[in-house]
Amino acid sequence: MRVTRVKGSDAARIDALDMIRGAAVMGILVANLPGFALPRSAYFSPLAWGGTTVADLAVWAGTFVLVEGKMRGLFAALFGVSLLLVVDRAERSGADWAAIHLRRMATLFVIGGAHLYLLWWGDILNQYALLGTVAFLFVGAPVRLLVATGAAGIAVAVIDGASLALAAQAAAPRATVSQVATWQSLASGWGVPPPSELRAEIAAFRGPWLQGVIWRWNGSVDPFTTAIRSGAETIGYILLGMAAYRSGFVTLGWARRNYRRIAVATLLPTLAIHVWLAVATWRSGFDLRQVLLASMVVSPMFRPFMVAGYAALLLLAFRPGGWLSTRVAAAGRMALSNYLGTSIVMAFVFDGWGLGQFARWPRAGLCLLVPVAWAAMLWWSTWWLRRFAYGPAEWLWRAAARGEIPRRRPR
């Protein structure tokens, strides 16, 4: 496809990019709600916890089809975009862009570690920091190499998911001690864990804050192991995001007709495929083998196309100076603050040191929090950026990474 440049200011292009980032962080809230409110295994299987009414299962299906994995992929791709933006700006100013990037990743790793162990087991910042250091090797790579390597990373993730699905298939008879152990191990992550595991997790998060910290320390996989085990997909999206930036795709560098073509060509077939996967998984009774096949093999194969389609759709919806575009872009400029702020608020609602609502809400009931949280994000992000140059977390990240006090007021 021939890339066609469009007229427009650099500010408009950055606002469009911020709007995609804002939509992604708002979507990640929806994806992460079961992780904040329910036992970990309920993220993939409604049978683990959260209710099995038609409403609960419909919410699971809607999240699976529209959100799960797609917002994470979009957010990782935008991390790759931000990586190059920082490098390009540092290079233009004559700064040591390599040192700036590595300090940013080191600082982000510390922030992610605090988030992982002190607040929520589902942190992604640690992985971004580690894999962002690897992605640094591709800063000067051409678009084709970025696309090819990114696609290879996602292919590795699909192969790894297939190995899990095959292991579940082989262990399904549960006729030997080994098969039983394999099945139970997989069920702890993607199916229905033993009642003792569920009780221990619920007790940990309904208890004092320190009890939750201890559970996360003992029960969460360390960041380095996570990056090795599941980092292929993340690095794939980071590199694809870098390619999207270099090609002008995410900065309004293409003709609108191309964005329309991409949105239609990617979203229509992939949404149909995900609807089919959701129906098949529901009809199987959330059999562990089907859950793994749908969530870890087939969906990751088509996710990159949905991510591209969502980005194209958002760019088509972007209106410079528009009421909604401006507010969603503000949320995107404060994506780190909103991501961490969401964890603080949701931990307060569901953990024992706050309101203690962990594992008390049905899955469908969690939807009531979405419009409230979205409205809060849009309001406070706009309010804050009218008064300050950076979000609070962004300001601290910049100060720590650069070793200087950033300006506080907007220009």
Image: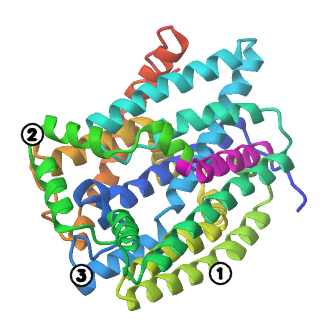
Residue plotted at (52% across, 87% down): 276
Query: Seen from this angle, which residue lies furthest right?
Result: 2
Q: Quadrant of residue 202?
A: bottom left
Magenta-span inclusion, residue 243: yes
Left or right: where does residue 382 sit relative to residue 204?
Answer: right
Q: Which residue is mark 2?
A: 208
Other residues around mark 1 within 10 Å, as few (<14) / some (14–19) / many (≥20): some
Q: Earlier in the sequence, mark 1 or mark 3?
A: 3
Secondary structure that dominates the magenta span: helix
Residue 358, horizontal then vertical, whole percent: 16, 56
In this rendering, is residue 331 above or below 91? Answer: below
Other residues around mark 2 within 10 Å, as few (<14) / some (14–19) / many (≥20): some
Identify which amino acid the numbered label 1 is placed on.
Pro
Q: Which residue is mark 1?
A: 269
Query: Seen from this angle, which residue lies furthest top?
Result: 404
For the record, the magenta segment spans 229-246
Question: Is disc 2 in contact with disc 3, using a CB cutoff of under 8 Å?
Answer: no
Q: Earlier in the sequence, mark 1 or mark 2?
A: 2
Q: CA distance from mark 2 to mark 3?
A: 29 Å
Q: Which residue is mark 3?
A: 52
Q: Quadrant of residue 141?
A: top right
Return the residue nearer the eye: 68 or 262.
Answer: 68
Identify which amino acid the numbered label 3 is placed on.
Thr
